[in-house]
Image (cartoon, rainbow, N blue to C red):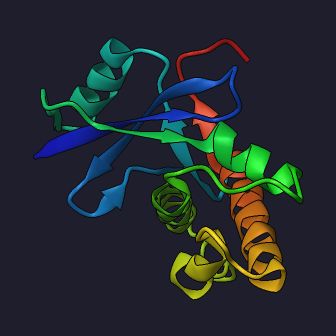
Amino acid sequence: MTWTKVWIDVDGEHCGYVLESDDGIVSFESDGRRLVPVFSTLENAALYAHEQGATLSAAPGGFHDLAALAAFVEDARGDPPPHAFDDWILLDEVAFAAERGEKLASPHDHEAGLRVGASSAARAAAREAVAAALGVVRSVLVFLDRPR
């Protein structure tokens, strides 16, 4: 089985790779909670994949700027970043991998709020839904190759 890598910038200081299998974002259980591992280096991501019986694809993976998405949430007057919808889809996938996505709003339900010229009500609803997804994702990401 081959996994792909996805680079994420969580908040400008915490960046790394999450891994994706054919079943979705890779997660593991710890103390009764599902968590999503993040790796600072490609070497550590490949080692983890190998330990799980997978190989890491050599193809370049995606990039998601969650820091830009967080800035959109914090600035009530700002426009969403250009790839906000794709980044929100990743948030949704991470949340579901950690079994925490059921109560989150679907990105598809609020996509209009991310478009240029969106109404203030649609923009506010999208901003609130993205904020909830970011909160869940921040609580389930764990950097496995950094000292705690």
Q: Position of residue 28 (x, y in %)?
A: 48, 49
Q: Position of residue 78 (x, y in %)?
A: 79, 53
Drawn side of residue 104 relative to residue 35, left or right: right
Quarter of the image where one finds residue 136: bottom right
**Of 49 and 79, the residue lying toward us:** 79
**Of 94 and 73, the residue lying toward us:** 73
**Of 20 and 107, the residue lying toward us:** 107
What is the quadrant of the C terminus in the image?
top right
Residue 100 in view of the camera: no
Q: Is residue 118 above or below residue 72?
A: below
Residue at image x 47%, y 25%?
A: 39
Residue at image x 27%, y 23%?
A: 46
Q: In this view, does 87 lie above or below 43?
A: below
Residue at image x 71%, y 65%?
A: 130
Drawn side of residue 2 relative to residue 62, left or right: left
Drawn side of residue 82 relative to residue 62, left or right: right
Residue 7 in view of the camera: yes
Q: Where is residue 113 in the image (x, y as percent from the top left)?
A: 67, 76
Quarter of the image where one finds residue 14: top right
Number of callouts in the render? 0
Q: Is residue 61 above or below residue 148?
A: below
Q: Position of residue 45 (x, y in %)?
A: 35, 25
Drawn side of residue 92 relative to residue 148, left or right: left
Residue at image x 49%, y 52%?
A: 83
